[in-house]
Every structure is written in C-alpha cells, then in structure tokens.
Image (cartoon, grey):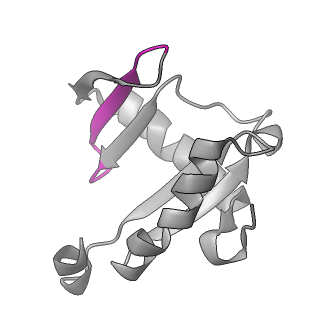
Amino acid sequence: MSDATARGVSFRRARVVSEPASAYIRYEHACTYQNVAAGELVRWLPRRKASDLALPGNDFWLFDERLIMWNHFTGEGASAGPEMDEREDVAKFCAAAFDAVWERATPHEEYGI
C-alpha cells in the first residue's frame, strides 16, 4: 500500500460499526494505525448513524469505481470467499453508498473506542 500511495493512488476505507464495540472491532481499531501509516485514509461510522442510508448487503472493495469485490462471510465471521462483480449500475450504487458513509464518518484519528 505504501508504494501505491507514493505513486498517488488513493485508498479510503470506511467502517460501519456497532457500538459498544466488540472485542474484535476494538482490536481492529487498535491496529488501524498501520493502515494510516501506509497512507490509507480510514473513517468510522457508528451503525446507529447509518440507519437512513442505502447500503449494500455485503462488505465490499470498489476499484476504479467500476469493479466490485464482494467479501462474503460465514455466520462465524470466517471468509466464505470473494466474488467479483462488474455490473455498472451496482458499482454506481456502491460508490454512492460509500460516499454517503464517508461524509458522515469520523476520521480514524478522532474516533475513540
């Protein structure tokens, strides 16, 4: 990630989280300094502040506003494998959803758990 951000590539991550935070989310928050140090911008949004947002049903990565990688999980939280999706309308939906979350979310440096 450091090499990519040095080339001018932008990485933004938004995490919608339940509060109070679970042990795993507290761990994830504590480790996020590594993402930030590598050049990633990270924000956090409490789930209660996302109730009126239209959000995809699965975690995802959006690449170049056109390629989605859905992250599917089992009921125990383990990966059930990714799925690639190039549907233009779905990519636009994901981009709009992410932007709505990003606007409301708190930068990592200001979000306390």
Task: Identify the residue at image location x=40%, y=22%.
Answer: 73
Image side of residue 74 versus residue 110, left or right: left
Coordinates of residue 20 in the picture (x, y in percent): 81, 44
Coordinates of residue 58 in the picture (x, y in percent): 47, 26
- Which of these two is toward me, 52 or 38? 38
Q: Is residue 4 above or below residue 83?
A: below
Asked if residue 64 lies in the magenta stretch, the reply is yes
Q: Main secondary structure of the magenta part?
A: strand
Asked if residue 30 lies in the magenta stretch, the reply is no
Coordinates of residue 3 in the picture (x, y in percent): 16, 79
Q: Is residue 5 above or below residue 23?
A: below
Q: Is residue 35 above or below residue 20?
A: below
Task: Identify the residue at image location x=35%, y=30%.
Answer: 71
Residue 99 appears anywhere in the view = no
- Which of these two is toward me, 91 or 80? 80
- Which of these two is toward me, 4 or 86? 4
Residue numbers of the magenta segment: 63-75
